[in-house]
Amino acid sequence: TDQVNTWQNPVPIPVFVPEIILAQETVIDSLENNNQSLDPGETVSLELLIMNEGSFLAGDADASLAVNHTGIDILNPAIAMGDLHPDSTAMLIFSVEASAEVATGAVAPFTLTIIDSLGYTFTGEFDLRIGKVPVLVVDLDANLNSGPDILSAAIANGVSAEYTDVFPADFSDYISVFVCLGTYSGNHVLSVS
């Protein structure tokens, strides 16, 4: 600085740290019904693919998995991972059990925590649907003629159901789908696009 001006010049300082990401969650239930889903009453392997996208080793790391849902238990909640080098991956395999009383279609929130020997901590969260939702009501009818009633009837009969007014790109989380298009004078027209 001088008496009139102040000059600033940023100085880049590289920081070498591990940067762990949770890349993929996969349910393996080949000893059950093999539908790649944790269903009520099942015990499955939950495979978590993690990556170190950072520039430093995550050394002597430990992983733990927690779930916040009644009736879902993690049978091996802690895993000693060892080292995870930069630009490498590791597969963590946890055994997860859902009680038969867990509602089909419920969503269980999981938290993966990884801590290495230097104290670097990674926390990743993901949701896992338990089974498939029995009913989805897709209501494209602008007049709401049937959709709300179908939803109410399902719930009144003890059937888990979800409601949307947008056509989903993927129906794999649902057992059955009711699509409401409206009445002849004002109905929604389905198209390929």
Image (cartoon, rainbow, N blue to C red):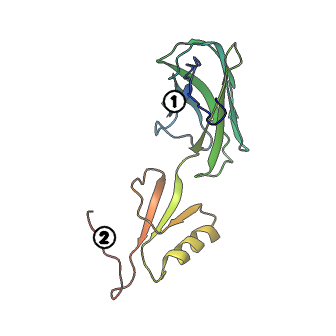
Q: Amino acid at mark 1?
A: Leu
**For mark 1, what is the residue?**
31
Q: Residue at x 58, y 52 (%)?
A: 105
For this view, does 140 lie left or right of residue 18?
left
Q: Amino acid at mark 2?
A: Leu
Query: Given this view, does label 2 or label 1 mark the residue nearer the observer?
Result: 2
**For mark 2, what is the residue?**
190
Percent position of residue 177, x then y: 44, 63
Q: Residue at x 61, y 26 (%)?
A: 94
For this view, does 188 lie left or right of residue 93?
left
On screen, 166 above or below 96? below
| Rendered image quadrant of residue 113 | top right
Q: Secondary structure at mark 1?
A: loop
For the residue pair 151 and 63, the one nearer the viewer reads as 63
| Rendered image quadrant of residue 180 | bottom left
Q: Residue at x 54, y 55 (%)?
A: 133
Percent position of residue 126, x then y: 59, 40
